[in-house]
Image: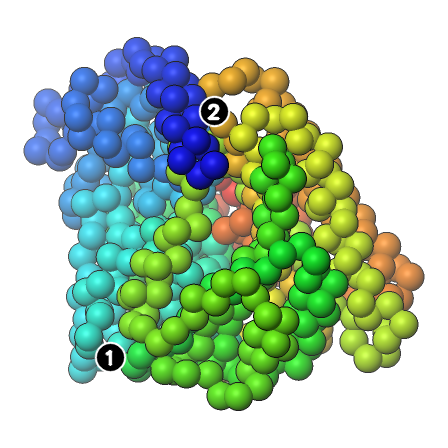
Amino acid sequence: MASFRSFAVLCATVSYLASGVGAAVTSATCQTLEATTDISIDHPIDIAYTQENSEYWSAGCTALKPACIIKPTTAQEMSAVVKVLLQNNETFSVKSGGHNPNQNFASIDGGPLISTANLNEVIYDAEAGTVRVGTGNRWEDVHKVLDGLNVTIVGGRIGNVGVGGYILGGGLSFLSGEHGWAANNLLEADIVLANGTIVTASNTQNSDLLKVLKAGGPNVGIVTAYTLKAHPVGQVWGGNLVFGSEKTADLLKALRNFTLNYPDEKAGIILTSEITLSTLVNIWIMFLFYDGPTPPAGVFDMFTSLQPGVNSAKTRSYYDLLSFNDWAIVKGSVYTIATETTTLPTAEFADVADTHLTNCFNHWKNVSNSIAEVPGLIASVAFQPYPAQFARKAKAVDPSGDLLALDDSADRIIFEFDYSYLPGLGAQNDVKVDDATVRLYSGMKDIVDTAVADRRIPDAYRPLFMNDGYFRQDYWGRIAPESRELVQRVSAAVDPNQFFKTRTAGGFFVN
């Protein structure tokens, strides 16, 4: 079955992508840069262009054909690109790892695409306790350099995820229990502003600009490098547990207990349910992590005692674990992502303790089943714990704060909703999945809002997690007003003509 699906994806993808050949048009930016600079530029006839434009998790992004792909290698070259863009009215996009599946957030049809792929430095400063990371890296690239040095940085949970957009969205990590969001570990950033100026943002210079980068998205400039805190690390323990759908009730109960009674700041999990709609096969796949060679007794017992059909957790290096987790990527399909946040019932809500997450799960399953006819559809929901301890740790390690500004008044679950399906089989499938995605996240919000109104779960601040946001979701409408106002103020100061908001093809831009 797996080989048949892979072949089907390949055939459909070739057809889908071929339909876009020739879509690229002449670009004034590309022509000017080629005539006046030595910056690397890939054209549609180049093999390098095809390779770079295939480096997306979603075939929906690969189907968009940029006029050219611009690959600066330094902040100075990025500045030159921005200055040329200022001379024309072309819409452009900036790409890091290509993880974000929202079309135009890191992809573009007909305009110039700026790839950060050649901004790939990884420099460990043992004396300062920092790692300088170019925004074109993927997390597995970073950890490969750090492997064997007994240090790590707070980053992605799957190796193939790109560095650039991950931190701008906040960055939830296996290490968040110990060290907060990835953004809380950001010490310094090099940024190209809208006028082409290169500035450094840190706690001692341009501090407001630095804070805006911590879950503020692409509103103030193009980051070319981050300097992040380094943390000691040795061998870690992790892998996957796989369960059948008959364990659903027990797994949701264990998830709630793990989150409410967070057992160890070194522990991290993602609990994912996946349905292959063509076969109606529903399984649970759990990602486990422990920052140490083995977890103490009791940390994960509530899950391992449920007798998983597969248990691949073992002691390994952090780099090995992140690379291993790449198996979860399904490239070649059109892929969508969305999110919602819920608080969890505590002891005072004991009578409904085990029903709220079940209601959420059932809503996801019902909406997904409603589009089962979409060819090759795989639906998944990831339950990502965000215990109150995470919020306390974020404030402790980063007193200046991040834009999400989550408090410790409640334990939360951050949902990630994903659909993937075969490309090139009709625009009607895009419409069906888009409609289902909106019904899914809006209906989930209704379920949570109703539970709050009925006093079945705690009433607490519930922002959206940008890294998992659907392009139709109102990220800035859900974030703390003071965070939104800070971004508005800083954006107006460094980009008064709103160059990035009006000229970038897509992204979560503040109003």
Measure how far apart labels 1 and 2 are at the Cα level.
42 Å
Q: Which amino acid type is marked by label 1?
A: Asn
Q: Nearer the viewer, residue 36 or 479?
A: 479
Residue 384: x and y in percent read 58, 62
Which type of secondary structure does the marked residue at label 2 adopt? loop
Q: Is residue 38 left or right of residue 360?
A: left
Q: Which residue is mark 2?
A: 423
- Earlier sequence position, callout 1 versus callout 2: 1
The one of 213 and 283 positioned closer to us in this rendering: 283
For the point 17% across and 48% down, the residue is 74
Q: Residue 374, percent across and down?
A: 61, 26
Classify 464 as above or below 393: above
Secondary structure of the residue carrying numbered label 1: loop
Residue 51 falls in which quadrant of the image?
top left
Say which mark, if any, is on residue 485.
Answer: none
- Look at the image and tell me whether residue 3 can be seen: yes
- As drawn, which residue projects farthest toward the bottom? 297
Q: Which mark is residue 150?
A: 1
Q: Is residue 371 above or below residue 361?
A: above
Q: Can you tell which quarter of the image residue 270 is in?
A: bottom right
Q: Quadrant of residue 341?
A: bottom right
Residue 241 percent location from the top left of the image: 52, 64
Mark 2 residue type: Pro
Q: Is residue 497 in view? A: no
